[in-house]
Amino acid sequence: MQPEDLPAEVPSANSALLDVREQEEWDAGHAPGAVHIPMAEIPQRLDEVPEADQVFVICRSGGRSSKVTAYLNANGWDAVNVERGMNGWSAGGRPVVTDTPDAEAYVL
């Protein structure tokens, strides 16, 4: 799914946004309300993947999230890959935030 085709409210009561980028990418900037589990940690942290009607999976450009989406779907989730990832998210005008006070958020 393209970032511009996502529901306006993600995450919501029925959906979650799972960011599978590395820690330094997350620290630079991420979508508000996203859950962060790096791709390599997904198998050990499946219990932390949100139990939502749909889990939108995002990385920087869509490659890693595509692999995680396939893995989650094989394990019982209704996961959807966000094509173009955070690059597309940001380019489409969706908000990017950081947890560091006074730091400007950007997609790394």
Image (tube, grey):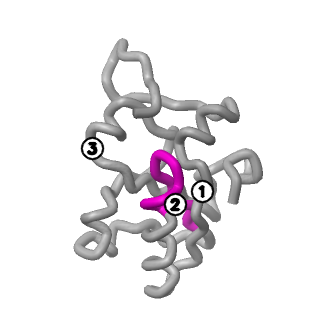
- The magenta segment is 55-65
Q: Which tag, 1 or 3, sits closer to the chain's start?
A: 3
Task: Tell me what residue is drawn at x 69 percent, y 35 percent.
Answer: 92
Mark 1, secondary structure of its residue: loop
Q: Check if mark 2's residue and mark 1's residue have beta carbons within 8 Å.
A: yes
Label 2 CA crowd tier, 10 Å (few <14, some 14–19, many 20+): many
Residue located farthest toward the top when viewing the structure as drawn? 102
Q: Which mark, by number, is residue 57?
A: 2
Q: Does residue 83 lie above or below 87 as drawn?
A: below
Task: Estimate the x, y position of residue 10 in percent, counting from the top left.
Answer: 63, 50
Mark 2, secondary structure of its residue: strand
Q: Which tag, 2 or 3, sits closer to the chain's start?
A: 3
Task: Tell me what residue is drawn at x 70 percent, y 53 percent.
Answer: 2
Residue 22 lies in magenta, yes or no? no
Q: Label 1 vs label 3: CA separation? A: 19 Å
If the image is split into quadrants, where does the C terminus sit?
A: top left
Q: Which mark, by number, is residue 23?
A: 3
Q: Label 2 vs label 3: CA separation? A: 16 Å
Label 1 sits on residue:
82
Q: Check if mark 1's residue and mark 3's residue have beta carbons within 8 Å.
A: no
Q: Which tag, 2 or 1, sits closer to the chain's start?
A: 2
Task: Estimate the x, y position of residue 23 in percent, counting from the top left.
Answer: 27, 44
Q: Label 2 vs label 1: CA separation? A: 6 Å
Mark 3, secondary structure of its residue: helix
